[in-house]
Image (cartoon, helix red, strand yellow):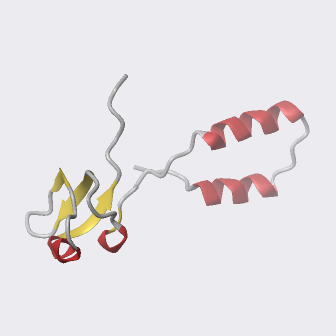
Amino acid sequence: MKGITEERLKEVFSKLYWSRNDEKELFNALLSECTELNAWQPIETAPLRKKIRLFEIGPNEQCDGEILFESDRKFYTHWQELPEDPK
């Protein structure tokens, strides 16, 4: 999936000439809604004892669980926050 990071969007914005304030307000509203499309982070940065989504080394699959001890990190490569429940 293609996307744009918040940093890149800000860089593009800084190079544009805005002739009307409405356009700036629209852009800022869209920017506030941006989220990273790939929220996977290195396993070394995963919090301990918190329910998160993990990417396993062996079967290359996702699972939800916790890193209880530093030694548990060796079974995973990446992690991300769990999505919010639907409202």
Q: Nearer the viewer, residue 70 or 27?
A: 70
Measuring from the top left, give residue 20's x and y in whole percent. 89, 34
Residue at image point 79% right, 56% down:
14
Measuring from the top left, give residue 28's x and y in whole percent. 72, 40
Q: Residue pushed farthest right? A: 19
Q: Nearer the viewer, residue 8 or 28?
A: 28
Q: How many marks?
A: 0
Residue at image point 87% right, 49% down:
17
Above or below: residue 3 compared with residue 78: above
Above or below: residue 45 compared with residue 18: below
Residue 33 shown left or right of residue 36 in the figure = right
Residue at image point 51% right, 47% down:
35
Residue 21 shown left or right of residue 45 in the figure = right
Measuring from the top left, give residue 37's x and y in whole percent. 44, 50
* Image quadrant where residue 32 sits: top right
* Image quadrant where residue 69 sits: bottom left
Q: Residue pushed farthest left? A: 59
Residue 81 shown left or right of residue 76 in the figure = right
Q: Nearer the viewer, residue 75 or 35?
A: 75
Residue at image point 72% right, 39% down:
27
Q: Quadrant of the C terminus?
A: top left
